[in-house]
Image (cartoon, coloured by chain):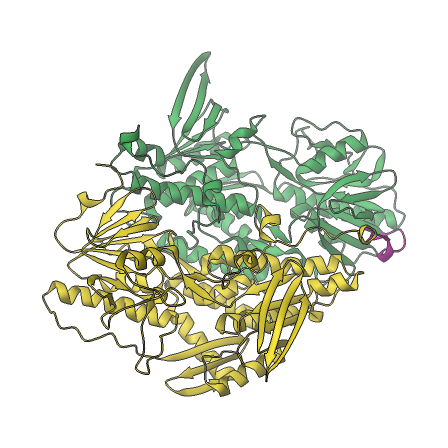
Chain colours: A green, B yellow
Amino acid sequence: MPPGTLEEDMTGKNRVVILGSGFGGLYAAKALKRAPVEVTVVDRRNFHLFQPLLYQVATGSLSPGEISAPIRAVLNKQKHTRVLLEEAVDLDPHAKIVYLRDGGQIPYDSLIVATGSQSSYFGNDKWREWAPSLKSVEDATAIRHKILYAFEAAERAHNNPEERRAWLTFVIVGAGPTGVELAGALGEIAHETLKNDFRYIKPEEAQILVLDGSPRVLPTYPEDLSKHAERALLKLHVRVRSHVKVIEVDGYGVDFEFQHNGLTQKGRIPCRTVIWAAGVATTEFGHVLARRTGMNGDRQGRIKVLPDLTIPNYPDIYVIGDQALVLNQQGKPLPGVAQVAMQEGSYAAHAIVKRLKGHADLPPFKYFDKGDLAVIGRGSAVANVFGFHLWGLPAWLIWLFIHLMYIVEFQNRILVFVQWAFFYVTFHRGARLITGHAAADVVVGTKPLKNPEED
Amino acid sequence: MPPGTLEEDMTGKNRVVILGSGFGGLYAAKALKRAPVEVTVVDRRNFHLFQPLLYQVATGSLSPGEISAPIRAVLNKQKHTRVLLEEAVDLDPHAKIVYLRDGGQIPYDSLIVATGSQSSYFGNDKWREWAPSLKSVEDATAIRHKILYAFEAAERAHNNPEERRAWLTFVIVGAGPTGVELAGALGEIAHETLKNDFRYIKPEEAQILVLDGSPRVLPTYPEDLSKHAERALLKLHVRVRSHVKVIEVDGYGVDFEFQHNGLTQKGRIPCRTVIWAAGVATTEFGHVLARRTGMNGDRQGRIKVLPDLTIPNYPDIYVIGDQALVLNQQGKPLPGVAQVAMQEGSYAAHAIVKRLKGHADLPPFKYFDKGDLAVIGRGSAVANVFGFHLWGLPAWLIWLFIHLMYIVEFQNRILVFVQWAFFYVTFHRGARLITGHAAADVVVGTKPLKNPEED
């Protein structure tokens, strides 16, 4: 038997395979803790990432290790659960087998697909080179590199005003929660953290722009909260440009189109740092899943599941998290946030157990919406909690509390708290490292400044 | 004037240029805080690294950000000090100019060379591919990747005993402090941290071997402490092989020669993880410095300096830290440790100021040896402090105290303390991340296991 085939270890009909250990996959695995099943969790990474705080890694407040928890450590008390550091590349939904990249095969009785999403450049994948997005730990350290290096390069180019200005201009594409959080943190970096660090430039010269095609920041939030968010951003010297569509990105700037009231204007922002916070799309495995089950994904590649989160005709395949298209009572898709994925993960786990016990009639999945939260800066956030609209310090305290509670592991919680306590008193950022062996590959567009005589 | 030339900003004859911001360079810069000079610190990295704790990053206890401090933040109160994120590539000691990689030039009146050392493979640079060494943050995360991945691969190869054993064999080349500290941490990982994390392998099956050509571990320490260290390692199931010379390293093992009492034996250890902790050599700039000043480096490329740490005939060039060959009263070279570099840095700074004030007669540099410390594991270290030999818990407490005190920044100190407190109670390691975009490039020798039918 080839080493990849894992049949040998699994008995009975209770083999649950979970693909992905983000919020959806991990909560499904945890919900199966006492279930009479054998669980296999497959992930390409050996750690669960607390993605809502990834922007703090990208902006130098936290270290990657502080928002990550080794999957094995989280699940090591569940003796019926094994973890595989591998990638699922294909699926036979009839034979009920998942194929792994190394040629291994995992048979399943129930499958939970929680493979998440990746960033999307809307067909302009070459922009990725100039405008990194924020999905993985590597993305976050690459963005941190780009941001910190920009100030260094500006200092070096201080006597070339044009060059200096381009290095000190930061464009964030996308005004959703990630874009807003990144922009707020960048405002604090420029105006507080780096205040005294340079000799030839003033970091507060930095221009931070958020571009979005929609008419307001946080377009999925209630309108009054969008206004509060925009006002809070402005206090941090972040300017929001609505109705703006990006049409080209390169190493020296962004071309845009401004469309409003029938008016169309084109323009260019010279800048050396662009961060992409605009779109998501399904992963490779998501495409495979759709193909193998004869489904059509929506525009983002999400698969529309039945009320019990399974795929039509495949009652043993559950799809959860960013990979699933689930509609709420108003017929609108649930957003791709941790809360949704966690609830779906728990639901899928309970559904599997119920069916094992012979309960055929399952109440449909119902999302319990606790609200939305986006943080802008120190003591500043907007929140829509159980229908109450909050902003400023109260919203921020709720954000702080919820995030501290949810971070998966106890130790990380203390650490993050210490970092934050320190940071919010001093604005000092503890993880301001420019790292990466192949700096030139990561920080595209940062080649040494040319001698002006060469120009 | 090309943007690289920095003459414009400097006046008078008091321009001090410091190359490198390790312990030597940083302490020189800090010692110049109130001096009537203008200081330029040049470093390729934007952060000072607390290198004595780098092995804790490599073994997943700490995150890189926790043992690093942004150079600008450390020096931002010194308004006469500027920091350049750049690399010195050449020197004209007659014209007194340092040349930077980007073509820039920095004139100096006094130069402090503190460019440190890099790892040396004694002419076998191709071993670097298979046996990473521990000098930079990137090295540390690559080693962490290799170690953690090895356990994952062993789990995956569990039904191939030979393969499993090779993945679970860890060879550390070099029994100096770094080798001993890495080995001790590896012992704890295998026997404590990962204890419950796997389903098919027992992490405690891991074999951890330390190879060294010398007759004992910590060869520069007093003999009784070497014995204590070896005993402490054995308790962590680490075996030391003395009188062993490595003659070949590849992705599947290490070839060695055992020489003792006229006996020579050859052998091979099949293993997938080799860590190089054996030798150091001068950096590129060290070679340039020797060439330009007509000096010959010693075997490691160190330059033998005068008693005032300057180069013969170049009273304005100070060489400190790993780059300098300084002899103690017994005529033996001072070791390449933080303590020596820090004292030399302060001395060079004071010498510059004294000479500026016209004091020509300078007492020679004298190293105040506070002792040596190497940690083996939780509650276990060896120390030679002011001639007192300590081991076990007392030595470890001294180690803990000294390291907490020295970590450059206040915040990091708290954080490291919290991590440690947690770790020493639970053996939990908070930073167990397998990261890196090009995993295949970093973790060499970890290609997917072959199907045995192919063999």
Work out which quarter of the rendered image holds the C terminus of chain A and state it: top left
Q: Is there any visible trace of residue A222 in the rendered image?
A: no
Task: Report the residue at 24% width, 66% height from top.
Answer: B310
Residue A181, x across and y down, in percent: 47, 41
B170 or B268, which is in the foreground? B268
Is A2 colored magenta in this rendering?
Answer: yes
Q: For the view shown, which residue lies furthest in the front direction?
A: B262
Relative to A160, residue B287 above or below: below
- Choose top left, top right, bottom left or bottom right for residue A230: top left
The answer to whether A212 appears left or right of B340 in the picture is right
Task: Report the residue at 49% width, 78% height from top.
Answer: B218
A187 or A150, which is in the foreground? A150
Q: What stretch is highlighted in magenta?
A: A1-14
Task: Report the residue at 36% width, 61% height from top.
Answer: B22
Q: For the view shown, which residue lies furthest in the top direction?
A: A262
Relative to B395, residue B351 above or below: above
Relative to B52, residue A368 above or below: above
